[in-house]
Image: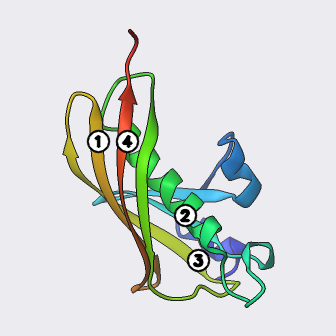
Amino acid sequence: MDASDVTDDGWVAMTGQGFVDEIGPMLTRQTPDGPRFAMRVEERHLNPFGIMHGGAIMTFLDHAIGITGARTHDAPGQATITLTVAFVDGVPAGVLLEADVEVVRTTRSVIFLRGAARVGEKVVATADGVWKIRRPR
C-alpha cells in the first residue's frame, strides 16, 4: 500500500498530537468494532538492524491505547501509569502498522486496557496498561 491506498481505505491523519506528530502521522478510522489506529513504517522508524525501533512501537501503542481510554470518561485528562509491551516480531519499513485496543475494565480512577500491534493479520507486539483518570480536585 502507498499513501493513497491508506487514504482510500478511509484512514485520516491525526494532527496536533504533540510528540506523536514527530513519529507520525498516526492514522485513525472508524470501524463497526470501534476506532482503529495505524501508522506507515518509514526508514526513520528503523533501528540499526533494519526493523522498527521498539520505542516507536511503544509510542504507537501508548497513544492508540490512551486515545481509546480517553473515550471511556468525561474527565479532562488521563496519564499512563504502566505500559507493558511484548515484542513478538520485527516490523520492516513500508508496512502499515495497525492497532487493536480493548478496554478491560474501568473504575472511577483508573482504566485497564489491552492492545495489539499488527501487520496485516500478524501480531507483532502486545501491550497491557493502566491509565489514571485525571479529575479536577
Direction from residue 103 to residue 67 in the image, left or right: right
Q: Earlier in the sequence, mark 4 or mark 1?
A: 1
Q: Secondary structure at mark 3?
A: strand
**SS for callout 4:** strand
Q: Is residue 11 visible?
A: no
- Residue 80 position within the rendered picture, expressed as x and y whole percent measured from the top left: 45, 43
The residue nearer to you, when weighing 96 against 125, is 125
Marks 4/1: CA distance? 5 Å
Disc 2 residue type (three-letter): Met
What is the three-letter code of the residue carrying label 3?
Answer: Leu
Q: Of the two numbered discs 1 and 2 on the same chain, state the one appearing first in sequence.
A: 2
User: Which residue is painted at 37% across and 35% down in the image?
Assistant: 132
Q: Which residue is rendered at x = 65% and y = 72% of the image?
A: 40
Any part of residue 134 in sight: yes
Q: Nearer the viewer, residue 74 or 30?
A: 74
Give the mark, 1 or 3, whose residue is nearer the N terminus: 3
> Is 92 positioned to the left or the right of 105 in the image?
right
Give the label on residue 9, or none. none
* Tag 3 residue: 96
Q: CA distance from mark 3 to mark 2?
A: 15 Å
Q: Position of residue 128 (x, y in %)?
A: 34, 61
For marks 2 and 4 on the same chain, the one whose residue lies earlier in the sequence:
2
Neighbourhood count class around disc 2 (C-alpha, 10 Å): few under 14, some 14–19, many 20 upward:
many
Instruction: Classify 79 as above or below 24.
Output: above
Q: CA distance from mark 1 to mark 2?
A: 18 Å
For disc 1, the marked residue is 111
Query: Which residue is depicted at the point 44% across and 67% down?
Result: 99
Residue 95 image point, x, y percent:
62, 83
- Classify the position of the N terminus by image quarter: bottom right
Q: Which residue is mark 4?
A: 131
Residue linked to disc 2: 58
Whole-angstrom CA distance, mark 1 to mark 3, is 28 Å
